[in-house]
Image: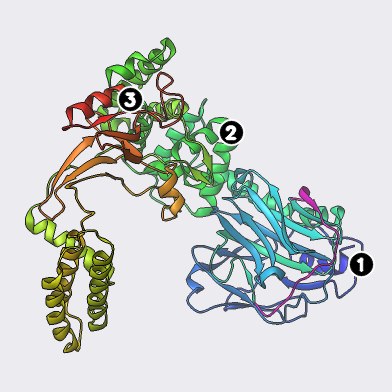
């Protein structure tokens, strides 16, 4: 049913393109058709006759270039770009839908749009997602939903043209790749789409930008069937065959096949380093695709071990990259290696054999590093990285790793000098005033200081006499009333009086404070309260401290951790008589609580640390 729609494609195609197909849909079937054949200018006309022309918006033209396409010309998109569709593209009243495009990706991010019109829940979306592992159609059919079709990004990062299509027929959302259905989602109902938001080709208004080449984008107001989608794909076969020959010739200059992945990658990296001409993005994608096709399992393993995207495989030509990656892997390999006698005593025979293997890997790494530049293109580096990666025990992962690895370290514990302590106090006071102690803020602090004195006087059995502090506040208020701008020094004087009032409260009858100093938790949502309270994103660097003296001249003393361990803490507490500490501690080289300790997680301090606490100061012990 595609003769009328596709006739222009076949007529304008390069020699050898497939002929138009012999079925005739309604003339109104096309909502938009961008051939992208125009050799110059910043406007790409809509060949459907509906005047939904595409325009490069200001500031984005540098990321858009002309390139050979499947049928005539195409667009090469890189970096940030915004190709805005004119306001005549209207989805109102559309009941069925097909989106079709030819793409030649050069890389993927979290999201890369093929087409998107963002009208809230009425959006129309066709995009690669999750670093190219999903090709998605998003529509509102009884509510917004997406049909997510899974794919291997390496299958489309091969330098070749690929046909992407998606349809809704009133009952099913379907996604196609190269003429074959790869995903379907049942949803009966009416399509709800359309609105005032502009559509964009290859982005979401300049974000989530597609990277690579795009050609022959079409939007139909009908749902093409599987045979029609396959016919659209077959129309591009002559261009794909010509490109395959061109890629074979181009890749022959760079690809050096070997018996194993390590030798193929190492020799190809060396060939690239010796080549003066830069490698364009499409050839680079094709080169990565060929390596993946030859060594699929080890290719995937290497990409995972290095923590890179497939398109970054050839970036490892950079000198020193393997040395840095090897150091990172070694840190992960020895993260849980025992350091204390008690930890070594708990190791099984299998554990001890594992640590001997890790020690051997450490020795091999040192030998590779000692080889210097002579080993830069040796397959031995790649073989070592694969061997090390296989032994790294990855953390539980859901969206992001739990408690991501941070190199263990504990800050130095020292008592601040008088000047440092005063500066820290003033920084905190200024922070509370948003670093702008205005006259209004100073007068408010005076009022709060008076309220504090009144509360203490009204609640204490033997209330202190605040006559001196209240008189001083009255004098400071007189100065504050004369201010016309912020005044740090006056603000600090008011805070000093307020501080004296607070510490004269009879309930403050102690001179020691037990507390935990912890680094900020890690992860993308480290600011969230749960990250701080629950500890599952905690990282090493915590300290259990005692402050002796409630003034800037107070002395700081560290109870835990003791070398060679670092770690994190959770909810320290004191016994009723303040002579024992109950503290939850996780050593940096342990995953949790040892089976030889209390089975209730986080309950007891290890024996090594009970001894350390007993040595740490008068009257304190651990349970």
Left or right, 487 with respect to 604, comes to: left
Q: Residue tagged by mark 3?
A: 606
Q: Earlier in the sequence, mark 3 or mark 1?
A: 1
Secondary structure beneath dot 1 equals loop
- The quarter of the image holding the C terminus is top left
Q: Which callout, 1 or 2, points to the residue nearer the camera?
A: 2
Residue 366 location, quadrant: top left
Residue drawn at the location 80% of the way across and 65% of the way down: 97
Instruction: Determine whether label 3 and label 1 are within 8 Å by CB.
Output: no
Residue drawn at the location 48% of the way across and 34% of the way down: 302
Residue 115: give x, y in percent of width and height: 66, 66
Q: Is residue 426 visible?
A: no
Region in magenta? 178-197
Way the structure is coloured: rainbow
Q: Disc 1 and disc 2: Cα gap in Å?
A: 43 Å
Q: Categorize mark 3 by other alpha carbons within 10 Å: few (<14), some (14-19), many (20+).
A: many
Q: Categorize mark 1 by other alpha carbons within 10 Å: few (<14), some (14-19), many (20+).
A: few
Q: Disc 3 and disc 1: Cα gap in Å?
A: 79 Å
Say if 370 sits above or below 420 in the image: above
Q: Which callout, 2 or 3, points to the residue nearer the camera?
A: 3
Q: Which mark is residue 24?
A: 1
Q: Residue tagged by mark 2?
A: 296
Q: Which callout, 3 or 1, points to the residue nearer the camera?
A: 3
Q: Earlier in the sequence, mark 1 or mark 2?
A: 1
Residue 338: give x, y in percent of width and height: 32, 22
Q: Nearest the camera: 295 or 142?
A: 142
Left or right, 508 with respect to 255, comes to: left
Q: Give the overall secondary structure of the magenta segment.
A: loop
Residue drawn at the location 86% of the way across and 59% of the way down: 188
Say if 118 sits above or below 211 in the image: below
Residue 73: give x, y in percent of width and height: 64, 66
Q: Does the magenta-highlighted stretch encompass residue 395?
A: no
């Amino acid at each position: 049913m595609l003769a009328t729609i596709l006739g222009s494609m076949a007529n304008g195609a390069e020699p050898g393109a497939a002929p138009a197909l012999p079925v005739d849909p309604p003339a109104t079937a096309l909502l938009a058709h961008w051939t992208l054949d125009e050799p110059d200018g910043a406007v790409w006309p809509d060949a459907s006759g509906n005047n939904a022309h595409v325009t490069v918006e200001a500031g984005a033209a540098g990321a858009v270039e002309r390139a050979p396409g499947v049928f005539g010309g195409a667009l090469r998109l890189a970096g940030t770009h915004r190709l805005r569709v004119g306001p005549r593209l209207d989805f109102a009243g559309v009941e069925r839908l097909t989106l079709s495009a030819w793409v030649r990706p050069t890389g993927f991010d979290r999201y890369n749009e093929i087409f998107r019109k963002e009208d809230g829940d009425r959006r129309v979306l066709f995009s690669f997602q999750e670093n190219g592992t999903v090709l998605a159609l998003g529509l509102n059919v009884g509510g917004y939903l997406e049909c997510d079709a899974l794919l291997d990004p390496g299958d489309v990062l091969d330098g070749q043209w690929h046909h992407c299509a998606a349809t809704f027929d009133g009952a099913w959302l379907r996604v196609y790749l190269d003429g074959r259905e790869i995903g379907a989602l049942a949803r009966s109902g009416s399509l709800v789409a359309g609105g005032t938001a502009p559509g964009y080709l290859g982005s979401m208004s300049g974000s989530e930008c597609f990277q690579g080449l795009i050609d022959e984008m079409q939007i139909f107001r009908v749902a093409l069937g599987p045979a029609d989608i396959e016919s659209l794909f077959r129309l591009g076969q002559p261009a794909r065959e010509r490109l395959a020959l061109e890629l074979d010739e181009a890749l022959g200059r760079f690809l050096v096949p070997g018996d194993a992945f390590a030798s193929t990658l190492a020799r190809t990296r060396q060939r690239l380093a010796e080549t003066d001409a830069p490698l364009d993005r499409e050839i680079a994608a094709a080169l990565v695709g060929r390596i993946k096709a030859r060594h699929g399992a080890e290719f995937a393993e290497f990409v995972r071990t290095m923590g890179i995207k497939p398109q970054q495989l050839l970036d490892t030509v950079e000198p020193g990259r393997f040395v840095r990656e090897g150091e990172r892997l070694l840190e992960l390999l020895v993260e849980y290696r025992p350091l204390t006698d008690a930890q070594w005593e708990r190791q099984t025979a299998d554990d001890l054999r594992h640590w001997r293997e890790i020690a051997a890997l450490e020795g091999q790494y040192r030998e590779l590093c000692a080889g210097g530049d002579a080993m830069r293109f040796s397959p031995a580096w790649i073989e070592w990285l694969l061997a090390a990666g296989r032994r790294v025990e990855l953390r539980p992962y859901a969206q992001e790793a739990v408690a991501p690895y941070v190199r263990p370290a504990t800050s130095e514990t020292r008592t601040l000098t008088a000047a440092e302590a005063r500066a820290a106090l003033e920084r905190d006071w200024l922070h509370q005033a948003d670093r702008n102690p205005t006259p209004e803020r100073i007068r408010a602090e005076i009022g709060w200081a008076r309220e504090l004195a009144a509360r203490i006087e009204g609640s204490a059995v033997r209330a202190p006499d605040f006559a001196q502090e209240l008189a001083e506040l009255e004098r400071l208020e007189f100065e504050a009333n004369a201010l016309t701008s912020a005044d740090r020094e006056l603000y600090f004087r008011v805070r000093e009086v307020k501080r004296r009032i607070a510490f004269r409260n009879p309930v403050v009858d102690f001179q020691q404070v037990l507390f935990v100093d912890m680094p900020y938790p890690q992860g993308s949502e480290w600011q969230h309260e749960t990250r701080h309270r629950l500890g599952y994103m905690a990282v090493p660097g915590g300290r259990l401290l005692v402050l002796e003296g409630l003034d800037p001249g107070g002395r700081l003393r560290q109870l835990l951790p003791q070398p060679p361990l670092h770690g994190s803490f959770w909810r320290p507490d004191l016994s009723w008589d303040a002579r024992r500490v109950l503290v939850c501690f996780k050593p940096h080289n342990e995953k949790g609580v040892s089976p030889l300790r209390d089975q209730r997680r986080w309950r007891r301090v290890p024996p090594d640390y009970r001894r350390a606490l007993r040595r740490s100061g008068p009257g304190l012990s651990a349970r």
